[in-house]
């Protein structure tokens, strides 16, 4: 995903002289091609994320479209107030990019697990919150958020996530993607769990639907309306704490549709998310997903 | 501003500041008065701006990091012609754009502040933008002493010389009193000059109520090519009203009617 991101950013930067990339002393073997091609629009701000985000706000105020880039919690939680106040309150064109979403850096421990940031960031006005599901979504979302003038957060995995979608995507901000149409049961997935869900459905010959949500905010309420019309049962899945994350956003979406009388009934809804725990053991992403219950079963429970 | 001397400008700022704080029963008059002379010299003699075009590309950018002291900034902007001074009657009232922390919705305010330790990093970004775009305008950031407790400032202080931001000027309103006590007791900044010098800034110290010293310092920046400048401006909290001077109380207190009248009288009589 991070490769898809940087490749797309370079393509966009060739045609858009406003694109500026700031890294927080991270991005080895990823950001070098950008730095080499656009030295006047690249900055290593050092290990100083509050300053990095303030600088991004200042550059954006002067007309740049600024990407900040670091791992997981560092460009996000570490400088949450700069994001809220400097960037989002002023509605500046800053795109915050975190690599290592969820347990992507599994063995590195809780410091490097980005498992709360979606919930924290989606409460901030003006901020678009994105978690693409595969490299094709990453490419399309990167392009879409550049066209959008305003703050965005982009959660990436790391390198080497497999492609799920068959064709190049034309993504509209705030729209879900129907990956597989099915019957009765649908899985709503955000971020890099998409491939796991896709394979699970295929390998078990299940007639389930699969919908990828590269945008947690704004949430696709029209899409949820269609899902409510067509499925009895919904499973949400995310690599994030259960409180406040993607599943919570989906519940809010259905509740708002219900409150506004746009749907007659809710589907039964199960949330698969991290059960309010930190990981104290080393483990690969797969291992941690398994021990924290981020897995499907054929019964859909 | 051609007709007004900076001394008259500062006096007008102080009068309006005290009136706003009194009428709104607001706080932070002490820190607003301590920086009134700095603002008068900046808006009277130093900053390039067009009060009828806040987006003028070549303007100097001024950021007030100590956003809680916005009354004297709003007063300075009104006096400088950015908006009608009558509009300040609404200060801190329901529905007013004049928040009691500096708001970018007010004409002439570059950036909203209120949470401390934010404007210097943003100022670094603005100054860096000027460098990268090869523009000549400068960026001025006015900080309080208390907010230098914030680590984010020191990230920016480390950054600016490394990137040769000689178009960046920080001014510290060093009135020696912060929110809950004297700076020397809460988190001692001494020696502030040595700290900035150790971070490779070029430093000048002035009496922040002496307009000649302030003017000379501002005219001298950058003190050295490729280095950011900090003007450590030694000031008195509450300057201009004897019973407010150097008192922690006036970080919070709003004057009574009698105190308001006494304060106005003292400032009217000054010069």
Image (cartoon, coloured by chain):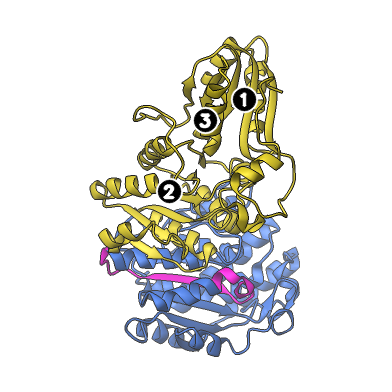
Chain colours: A yellow, B blue
Distance CA(mark 2)–CA(mark 3): 18 Å
Distance CA(mark 3)–CA(mark 1): 13 Å
In depth, the one of B251 and B271 nearer the eye is B251
Would you name the residue on which mark 2 appears? A2
Residue at 69% x, 19% y: name it: A299
- Mark number, residue A253: 1
- Tags 3 and 1 touching, CB below 8 Å: no
Q: Chain of mark 1?
A: A
In magenta stretch: residue A182: no
In magenta stretch: residue B148: yes
Q: Secondary structure at mark 1?
A: helix
Mark 2 neighbour class, 10 Å CA radius: few under 14, some 14 to 19, many 20 or more: many
Q: Secondary structure at mark 3?
A: loop
Quadrant of residue B25 within the rendered picture: bottom right
Residue at 70% x, 25% y: name it: A270
In depth, the one of B192 and A148 nearer the eye is A148
Q: Is residue B108 shown left or right of residue A222?
A: left
The answer as to whether the residues below labels 3 and 1 share one chain is yes
Residue B260 in sight from this viewpoint: yes
Would you name the residue on which mark 3 appears? A213
Compared to residue B151, the image places residue A83 above or below, namely above
Q: Secondary structure at mark 2?
A: helix
Given this view, does label 2 or label 3 mark the residue nearer the observer? 2
Mark 1 neighbour class, 10 Å CA radius: few under 14, some 14 to 19, many 20 or more: some
Magenta stretch, residue numbers: B133-153
The spot of residue B175 in percent (x, y) is: 62, 80
The quarter of the rendered structure image containing the N terminus of chain B is bottom left
Q: Chain of mark 2?
A: A
Quadrant of residue B217 within the rendered picture: bottom left
The answer as to whether the residues below labels 2 and 1 share one chain is yes
The spot of residue A1 in percent (x, y) is: 43, 44
Compared to residue A47, the image places residue A239 above or below, namely above
């Amino acid at each position: 995903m991070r490769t898809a991101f940087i490749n797309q950013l370079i393509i966009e930067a060739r045609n858009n002289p406003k694109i500026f990339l700031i890294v927080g002393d991270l991005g080895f073997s990823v950001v070098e091609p950008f730095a080499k091609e656009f030295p006047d629009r690249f900055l290593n701000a050092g290990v100083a994320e509050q300053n990095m985000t303030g600088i991004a706000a200042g550059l954006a105020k002067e007309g740049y479209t600024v990407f900040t880039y670091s791992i997981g919690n560092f460009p996000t939680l570490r400088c949450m107030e700069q994001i809220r106040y400097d960037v989002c309150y002023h509605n500046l064109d800053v795109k915050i990019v975190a690599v290592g979403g969820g347990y992507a850096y599994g063995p590195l421990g809780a410091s490097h697990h980005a498992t709360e940031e979606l919930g924290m960031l989606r409460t901030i006005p003006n901020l678009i919150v994105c978690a693409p599901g595969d490299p094709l979504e990453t490419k399309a979302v990167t392009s879409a958020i550049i066209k959008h003038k305003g703050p965005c957060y982009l959660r990436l995995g790391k390198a080497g996530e497999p492609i799920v979608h068959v064709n190049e995507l034309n993504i509209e901000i705030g729209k879900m993607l129907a990956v597989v149409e099915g019957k009765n049961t649908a899985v709503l997935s955000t971020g890099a769990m998409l491939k796991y869900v896709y394979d699970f459905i295929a390998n078990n010959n299940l007639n389930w639907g699969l919908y990828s949500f590269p945008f947690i905010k704004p949430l696709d309420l029209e899409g949820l309306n269609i899902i409510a019309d067509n499925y009895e049962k919904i499973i949400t899945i995310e690599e994030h704490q259960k409180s406040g994350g993607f599943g919570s956003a989906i519940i809010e979406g259905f509740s708002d549709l219900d409150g506004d009388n746009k749907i007659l009934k809710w589907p039964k809804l199960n949330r698969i998310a991290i059960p309010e725990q930190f990981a104290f053991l080393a483990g690969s992403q797969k291992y941690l997903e398994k021990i924290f219950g981020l897995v499907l079963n054929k019964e859909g429970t | 501003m051609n007709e007004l001397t900076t001394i008259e400008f500062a006096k007008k700022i102080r009068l309006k500041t005290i009136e706003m704080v009194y009428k709104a029963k607001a706080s932070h008059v002490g820190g607003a008065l301590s920086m009134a002379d700095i603002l008068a010299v900046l808006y009277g003699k130093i900053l390039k701006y067009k009060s009828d075009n806040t987006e003028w590309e070549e303007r100097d950018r001024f950021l007030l990091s100590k956003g809680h002291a916005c009354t004297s900034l709003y007063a300075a902007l009104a006096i400088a012609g950015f908006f009608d001074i009558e509009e300040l009657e609404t200060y801190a009232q329901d529905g007013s754009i004049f928040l009691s922390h500096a708001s970018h919705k007010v004409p002439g305010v570059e950036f909203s502040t209120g949470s401390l330790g934010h404007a210097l990093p943003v100022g670094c970004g603005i100054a860096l933008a000027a460098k990268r775009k090869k523009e000549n305008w400068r960026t001025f950031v006015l900080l309080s002493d208390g907010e230098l407790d914030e680590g984010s400032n020191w990230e920016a202080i480390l950054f600016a010389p490394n990137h040769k931001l000689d178009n960046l000027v920080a001014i510290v309103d060093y009135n020696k009193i912060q929110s809950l006590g004297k700076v020397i007791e809460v988190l001692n900044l001494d020696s502030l000059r040595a700290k900035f010098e150790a971070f490779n800034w070029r430093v000048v110290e002035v009496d922040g109520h002496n307009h000649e010293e302030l003017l000379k310092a501002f005219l001298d920046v950058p003190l050295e090519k490729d280095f950011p400048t900090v003007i450590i401006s030694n000031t008195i909290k509450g300057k201009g009203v004897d019973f407010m001077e150097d008192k922690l109380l006036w970080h919070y207190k709003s004057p009574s009617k009698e105190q308001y009248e006494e304060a106005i009288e003292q400032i009217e009589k000054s010069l």
